[in-house]
Amino acid sequence: MMDKIYFLFVNDQQIGPFSLDELKAKHINPETYVWYEGLDDWTQVRNIEGLKSLFSSIPPQFNKNTKENISQKSHDKILGMKKLRFYALVFSICLLSILLYFRSTYIRQQDLIHSKSRQIEQMTTQNHNQQKMIEELQVELTENIENNRRLFDSEVRDNIENKRQTLLIQLNEAKANLRKAEAELSDAESFQLLRMSWEREEDIRVAMDNVDKWRLEIIRLEQSMKSLTKTGY
């Protein structure tokens, strides 16, 4: 019984024949196309379940249609994978990339929101501290104004009291001078010895002028006293 004879189609060329042992030495892969007697067409090695018949005839001509079929089958794969599996893998990678991008964007947005929240909290705290400081300054300013007002009132009161005492002294002196001037006028009107009439009239006129002067002075001093009273101190 003879061993089977195999033909291979590699790199667009038909090679062979080979015995089973020679075929094994070629280190063929499952995608390699092989033909032997009993097969209708070139078939990939992985699709052959067994080699039972003896090969004794010439393999069919590798025609254009066969080549196109082989080319079409090779086009059904991308990078050694079926197109459907390849597209599914590419879709999965794209989907994963999109999900990672949105996740990264979401994380950045959350970090930005947290950062803004911290800034707002810091600004709120600063505003609260500034408002508290302003209120404390307002209280301090109010106290200073009140203290200065009391000090000013005390100084003004003391000053007015001193003026009142001075005016009172001047008023008493003016009244005493008025009484003295009135006494001199009375003497000038009643005394007639050793004086000429014109001398008497002159003495009376001088005495009356003196009386008028002190009366006016008393009026002025009393008005000044009233003005001090109106200040409310």
Image: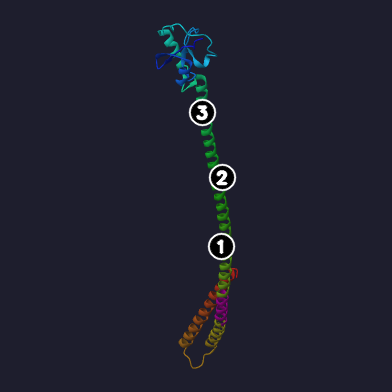
Q: Label 1 to label 2, Cα distance in Å?
A: 36 Å
Q: Amino acid at mark 2?
A: Ser
Crowd tier of the residue under label 1, counting other residues whose Cα lies within 10 Å: few below 14, some 14–19, many 20 or above: few
Q: Nearer the viewer, residue 202 or 97?
A: 97
Crowd tier of the residue under label 2, counting other residues whose Cα lies within 10 Å: few below 14, some 14–19, many 20 or above: few
Q: Nearer the viewer, residue 92 or 53?
A: 53
Q: Label 1 to label 3, Cα distance in Å?
A: 71 Å
Residue at the spot of label 1: 141
Residue under the point 57% across and 63% down: 140
How far from the left and from the top, in percent, is residue 34? 47, 13
Mark 2 or mark 3, earlier in chain: 3
Residue at the spot of label 2: 117
Magenta span includes 221: no
Q: Amino acid at mark 1?
A: Leu
Q: Is the Cβ of the residue at disc 1 closer than 8 Å to that at disc 2?
A: no
Question: What stretch of residues is rendered in magenta?
Answer: 160-172
How far from the left and from the top, in percent, is residue 54? 50, 9
Residue under the point 55% across and 70% down: 152
Q: Which mark is residue 181?
A: none
Mark 1 or mark 3, earlier in chain: 3
**Depth-wise, is mark 1 or mark 2 nearer the camera?**
2
Residue under the point 53% across and 30% down: 96
Residue at the spot of label 3: 93
